[in-house]
Image: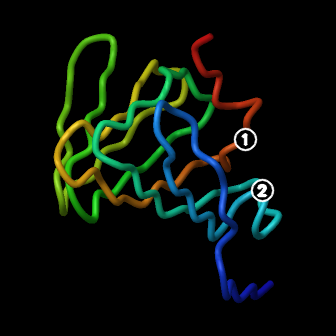
Amino acid sequence: MIQHIKTPAMIMGAGNKEKKIEEFFGRINSNTSEVSIARMTSPEGWIEPGQTPEFNEYTLVLKGTLKIQTREEEILVTEGQAILTGSGEWVQYSSPFAGGAEYVAICLPAFAMDLVRRDE
């Protein structure tokens, strides 16, 4: 199967500020549940609720700095760096620094609201 994605689906992100999510592959844009690939643009000061997702998330930072909070540590992922957060691990993403962050998120299996398990 060949699928040419000409434009991403725009999705509303969770958090205290508006985050731009451009889904290229996933349950919405390409009707795929195996993987989701999205470009994220989060503004300075953005923070989303903590979550314990049922998927692995591979994140590649293209611009700025992304802060990853786990139960054990705080990790700053800067431009050109990447991080893998594993299924079943509690994690919280934010972009607290000037300029925010732009990054690519790849989720296996694909992101779904019933799999993200966000904190209440």
Residue 113 vs residue 17, the one in the foreground:
17
Rendered-image quadrant of the N terminus: bottom right
Q: Position of residue 81 (x, y in %)?
A: 20, 55
Residue appearing at x 69%, y 67% in the figure: 9
Residue 41 vertical placement versus 25 (above, below):
above
Left/right placement of residue 64 relative to residue 59 reads left
| Contact flag, marks 1 and 2 (Cβ < 8 Å) | yes
Left or right: where 21 falls relative to 61: right
Of the numbered discs 1 and 2, the one sitting upstream in the chain is 2
Q: Quadrant of residue 21?
A: bottom right
Q: How is the image coloured?
A: rainbow
Instruction: Please state, as top left, top right, bottom left or bottom right, where the C terminus lies in the image.
Output: top right
Q: Is residue 27 left or right of residue 17?
A: right
Under mark 2, the amino acid is Arg
Q: Report which residue position mark 2 lands on.
A: 27
Residue occupying image coordinates x 28% and y 65% = 62
Does residue 8 lie above or below 54 as drawn? Answer: below
Task: Please tell me how crowded label 2 is: few (under 14), some (14-19), or many (20+) other residues with Cα within 10 Å.
Answer: some
Amino acid type shown at disc 1: Ala
- Which disc, if any, is residue 69? none
Q: Quadrant of residue 77?
A: top left
Q: How far apart are the two marked residues, 1 and 2, measured between alpha carbons?
A: 7 Å
- Residue 78, image x, y percentages: 17, 51
- With 45 as the anchor, is 55 left or right in this view? right
Give the quadrant of residue 24. bottom right
Q: Residue at x 66, y 67 (%)?
A: 25
Residue at 58 percent across and 28 percent down: it is 53
Give residue 92's position: percent from left, percent from top. 40, 26
Please give the label number shown on residue 112. 1
